[in-house]
Amino acid sequence: MNETVRRIVGPTILLHSGNYFDFEAPEASAFTIEDIAHGLAMTCRFAGHCNRHYSVAQHSVHISHMVPKQYAYEGLMHDAPEFAVGDMAKPLKVICPDYSTVEKRVERAVFKRFNVSLPLPVSIKEADIRMLATEQRQLMNNADRWHHTHGRAPYDFEIPTWTPEEAKARFLERYAELTGAA
């Protein structure tokens, strides 16, 4: 069988760059930081059920500013695997164990390619939870007690509205700032 055809009909997705991402061999797939930024910018948090578009890319940029400076890069990249696997809602992840297996494999490949060490620092998880509390209050107009945010104070800033294009640009700018990439 022609390799291109196998990749199209197999467990692959076509990336913005035109490359294919293979879920069976993520480490061998050709993907770039631009693919990551684009995918994250087009992926809305909370399965799209926000009061406005709020992308994983924007969330990641905010996290990179909330953690100690020495972890800013890891904060920016903490959700990078979602460029391929999406931002599946936590309750659905719990009942889909096969998804978690794929997600972890993609995470290892992405983090290895972009030199992000596992496990991620505790400060990133803490910032992520506080950001979730902030997002819940501002983007979901919801004050229910979510198990994941219990006891965590939301951040004291208004989440700005970014278009997907702006989120992608800001993600790439932050990446360049943190890595020295031009």
Image (cartoon, rainbow, N blue to C red):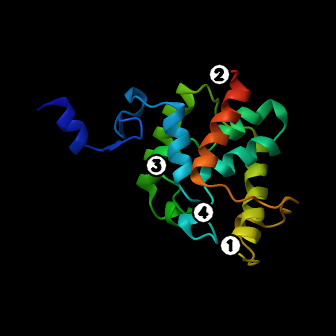
- Drawn side of residue 126 relative to residue 23, left or right: right
Kindly identify which residue carries mark 4.
53
The disc label shown at residue 85, or none: 3
The x and y percentages for residue 17 are 41, 35
Judged from this view, the residue extending furthest toward the left is 1
Do the CB atoms of the residues marked 2 and 1 lie less than 8 Å apart?
A: no
Q: Which of disc 4 and disc 1 is earlier in sequence?
A: 4
Do the CB atoms of the residues marked 3 and 4 lie less than 8 Å apart?
A: no
Q: Which of disc 1 and disc 2 is earlier in sequence?
A: 1
**Depth-wise, is mark 1 or mark 4 nearer the camera?**
4
Residue lying at 88% horizontally and 60% vertically, measured from the top left: 156
Q: Which of disc 3 and disc 2 is earlier in sequence?
A: 3
Name the image quarter holding residue 129: bottom right
Q: Which of disc 4 and disc 2 is earlier in sequence?
A: 4
Distance Cα–Cα, label 2 vs label 3: 26 Å
Kindly identify which residue carries mark 1.
140
**CA neighbours of label 4 inside 10 A, class few (<14), some (14 to 19), many (20+):** some
Q: Is residue 108 visible to us here?
A: no
**Depth-wise, is mark 2 or mark 1 nearer the camera?**
2
Amino acid residing under circle 3: Val
Distance Cα–Cα, label 3 vs label 1: 23 Å
**CA neighbours of label 3 inside 10 A, class few (<14), some (14 to 19), many (20+):** some
Q: What element carries label 4?
A: loop
Do the CB atoms of the residues marked 1 and 4 lie less than 8 Å apart?
A: no
Q: Is mark 2 on a helix, strand or loop?
A: loop
The disc label shown at residue 181, or none: 2
Q: Which of disc 1 and disc 3 is earlier in sequence?
A: 3
Q: In this view, does 111 lie above or below 81?
A: above
